[in-house]
Image: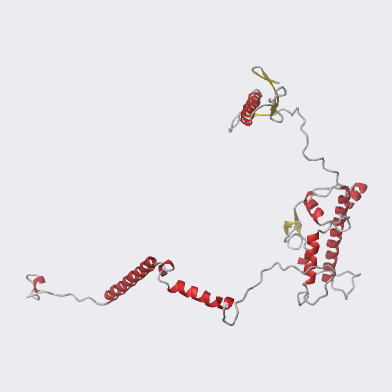
């Protein structure tokens, strides 16, 4: 119990829950008033939980004080029913009868072929039969029989037997309603072989769709097939393609010419600026012209650099006292 002034709250720190068993909401109250009262009462209950937490013994930590919650005092109901006990498999029954106990095996074992440690199962596992290049013959072996093909057949038989046992275990679990969670959905939509499933009644629309597909499955699309009494023609859900007539004439025959004229008028009309952006075209032309001019200028400058430059000697540039310049 937690006293908050004159109010009495019941606080369960194990579930971090608090409630007031003596509070009652008035019947005649608007929605806004009810929401405000709920927020106020919720704030008081949360404050009561916080006050009770600070009364517990705490230990200091880097993130702050830590407290250990006491065991819960309120029993909350389960959302789901208790899981049904799964029936034991054939191997579990045999192991329990013989007193065999499961022991944890190492994931890595020693491989005698390579002399290294490898994983027990999976890719490139230890003691792989497929990796043995030579099989030692026994005196009882048939010389006309291929030992490699025999080994593959034995492995296939073991896999098939294991799959058969797995399906049998699922059948037994389905009878008790204790299927594993990962196969419950698959078992409801596609029942396991050997189990009885409730037959699904086909609707009228489904029967009509199946009958229509069967009627139009012939080469003629069911045109020359005999109709049953009361059978309706199959519905054509697709769209029919409409082709213009080959010969030009009045009415629909002139539709092709009208479409052609409409396209030509749109292209050759005076308001062609709606189709062609003139400003953008001029800008692109100017940019392309400027790039060409710069490229030509760069070519000319590069060709001038390759040519030998001749120095021009003038009389005014000659130094005094130089006999060659006089």
Q: How is the image coloured?
A: secondary structure
x and y, in percent, of residue 147 in the image: 84, 71
| Residue lying at 43% horizontally and 66% vertically, measured from the top left | 274
Where in the figure is residue 88, as x and y percent of width and height?
88, 48
Residue at 68 percent across and 68 percent down: it is 238
Toward the viewer: 221 or 3? 221
Residue 279 left/right relative to 248: left
Provide residue 325's location: percent of width, then percent of height.
9, 75
Quadrant for the N terminus in the image: top right
Q: Is residue 165 above or below residue 6?
A: below
* Res. 87 visible in picture: no
Q: Position of residue 46 (x, y in %)?
A: 64, 28
- Residue placed at 86% from the left, 56% from the top? 199
State whether residue 217 is above or below residue 169.
Answer: below
| Relative depth, front residue between 43 and 159 | 43
Q: Residue furthest top?
A: 6
Instruction: For residue 188, say whether it is visible.
Output: yes
Taking the view exactly as shown, the residue that stands out farthest to the right is 97
The image shows residue 18, relative to residue 105, as above or below, that is above
Q: In which quarter of the image is residue 285?
A: bottom left
The relative height of residue 184 versus residue 71 in the rendered view (above or below) is: below
Closer-to-camera residue (182/224): 224
Furthest residue toward front: 250
User: Would you say 269 lies left or right of 150 here?
Assistant: left
Quarter in which the C terminus is drawn: bottom left
* Number of marks drawn: 0
């Amino acid at each position: 119990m937690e006293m908050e002034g004159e109010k009495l709250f019941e606080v369960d720190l194990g579930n971090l829950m608090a409630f007031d068993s003596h509070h009652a909401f008035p019947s005649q109250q608007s929605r806004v008033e009810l929401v405000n009262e709920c927020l106020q009462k919720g704030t008081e209950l949360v404050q009561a939980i916080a006050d009770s937490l600070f009364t517990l013994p705490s230990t200091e930590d880097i993130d702050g004080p830590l407290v250990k919650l006491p065991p819960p005092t309120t029993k909350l109901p389960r959302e789901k029913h208790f899981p049904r006990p799964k029936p034991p498999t054939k191997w579990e029954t045999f192991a329990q009868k013989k007193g065999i106990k499961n022991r944890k095996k190492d994931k890595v074992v020693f491989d005698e072929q390579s002399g290294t440690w490898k994983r027990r199962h999976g890719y490139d596992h230890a003691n792989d039969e497929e990796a043995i290049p030579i099989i030692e013959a026994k005196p009882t072996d048939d010389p006309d029989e291929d030992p490699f093909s025999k080994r593959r057949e034995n492995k296939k038989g073991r896999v098939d037997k294991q799959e058969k046992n797995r399906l049998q275990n699922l059948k037994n679990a389905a009878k008790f309603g204790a299927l594993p969670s990962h196969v419950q959905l698959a078992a409801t939509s596609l029942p396991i072989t050997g189990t009885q499933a409730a037959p699904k009644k086909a609707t009228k629309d489904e029967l009509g769709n199946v009958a229509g597909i069967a009627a139009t499955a012939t080469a003629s699309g069911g045109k020359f097939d005999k109709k049953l009494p009361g059978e309706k023609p199959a519905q054509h859900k697709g769209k029919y393609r409409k082709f213009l007539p080959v010969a030009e004439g009045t009415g629909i025959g002139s539709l092709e010419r009208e479409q052609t004229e409409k396209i030509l008028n749109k292209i050759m009309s005076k308001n062609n600026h709606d189709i062609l952006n003139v400003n953008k075209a001029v800008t692109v032309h100017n940019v392309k012209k400027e790039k060409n001019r710069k490229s030509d200028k760069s070519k000319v400058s590069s060709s001038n650099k390759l040519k030998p430059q001749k120095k021009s000697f003038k009389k005014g540039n000659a130094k005094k006292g130089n006999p060659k310049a006089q």
